[in-house]
Structures are given as structure tokens and as C-alpha cells.
Image (cartoon, grey):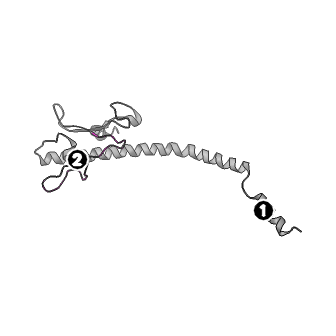
């Protein structure tokens, strides 16, 4: 019969994982990462586009409210939407004009010749005109037409 000391020593020697067990766990983690990471990145991009769309629609609605309050005249810049009036009210419920999810300012073109609606746009992740995928530019007209 084995003594208690021999049993304790044997338990200590058997503690831990074998190299094969560790390799199996590492392979499983690697497989899960290859399946999960692309989906997470795709969802992140979709959420960024969703935020930009929501911001553009909110800015457009605020611009239309501004025009109604100012006899059809649109502001020269988006800053007018966050400037309090004599009663302390603003057209956007914020202290500053929002920036797009890529930390760039939204572009704004007031209505002009040949265009009776304002244009609010973002240049996408790269912040420069043109591009595809995450760098794609879009505006309020593209959102209304279902292009984004």
C-alpha cells in the first residue's frame, strides 16, 4: 500500500496540462478567432454607417426646422443649428455640431442654383472625396434613395 507521501508526490507530478492538450486548446481558440473577428469588423463598419446616416437625417431635419422658422432661408453653416436663440433653444439638441464616426466634420452645402434642398454629406473613413467600401462618400439624397 502506498503511503500518503507517495500519493501527494504523484498528484503533484500529474498536475497541469500536457502539450497535446494545450495545442488542442490553442487550435480551437484560433478557429474561433478566424470566425468571429471578420463578423465583428463587418458589424463595426455597419454601425458606423448607421450612426452617420442617423446624424445626417437629424441634421437635415434640423435644417428644415430652421428654414421653417426663418421664412424658407437655410443657414450658411451648421453652427447656426447649435447656436441658442433668445429663448435658449437650438435646432439640434446638442451643444456642438456632431462629427461623423470617423471624426471628420459633416459637409454642408446650402440650397443654391439648381438645387432647392440642402446637401449634408460625409466623405467616409478616409475623409477625402471619392472611395469605395468604408471610404465611400454619401449624402442625404443617397440615404433617401436607399443607396446607403
Q: Does the magenta stretch include residue 47?
A: no
In the rendered view, does 53 fall on the left or right side of 79?
right
The dominant secondary structure in magenta is: loop
Instruction: Identify the image quadrant of residue 64.
Output: top left
User: Which contiguous range is marked in magenta?
Assistant: 86-106
Q: Is mark 2 on a helix, strand or loop?
A: helix
Q: Which residue is drawn at 79% across and 65% down?
A: 8
Instruction: Identify the image quadrant of residue 105.
Output: top left
Q: In this view, does 68 lie above or below 5?
A: above
- Other residues around mark 1 within 10 Å, as few (<14) / some (14–19) / many (≥20): few
In the rendered view, does 109 fall on the left or right side of 10?
left
Q: What is the quadrant of the N terminus in the image?
A: bottom right
**Observer-nearest residue: 110 or 10?**
10
- Residue with the mark numbered 1: 11
Q: Where is residue 86 in the image (x, y as percent from the top left)?
A: 12, 54
Q: Does the magenta stretch include residue 99?
A: yes
Sequence-wise, which precedes: disc 2 or disc 1?
1
Amino acid at each position: 500500500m502506498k503511503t500518503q507521501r507517495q500519493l501527494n508526490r504523484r498528484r503533484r507530478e500529474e498536475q497541469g496540462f500536457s502539450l497535446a492538450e494545450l495545442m488542442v486548446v490553442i487550435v480551437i481558440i484560433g478557429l474561433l478567432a478566424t470566425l468571429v473577428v471578420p463578423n465583428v469588423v463587418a458589424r463595426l463598419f455597419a454601425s458606423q454607417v448607421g450612426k452617420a446616416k442617423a446624424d445626417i437625417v437629424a441634421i437635415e431635419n434640423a435644417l428644415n426646422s430652421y428654414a421653417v422658422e426663418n421664412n424658407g432661408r437655410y443657414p450658411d453653416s451648421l453652427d447656426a443649428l447649435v447656436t441658442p436663440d433668445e429663448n435658449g433653444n437650438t435646432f439640434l439638441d446638442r451643444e456642438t455640431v456632431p462629427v461623423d464616426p470617423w471624426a471628420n466634420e459633416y459637409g454642408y452645402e446650402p440650397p443654391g442654383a439648381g438645387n432647392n434642398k440642402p446637401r449634408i454629406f460625409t466623405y467616409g473613413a478616409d475623409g477625402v472625396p471619392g472611395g469605395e467600401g468604408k471610404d465611400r462618400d454619401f449624402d442625404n439624397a443617397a440615404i433617401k434613395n436607399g443607396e446607403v
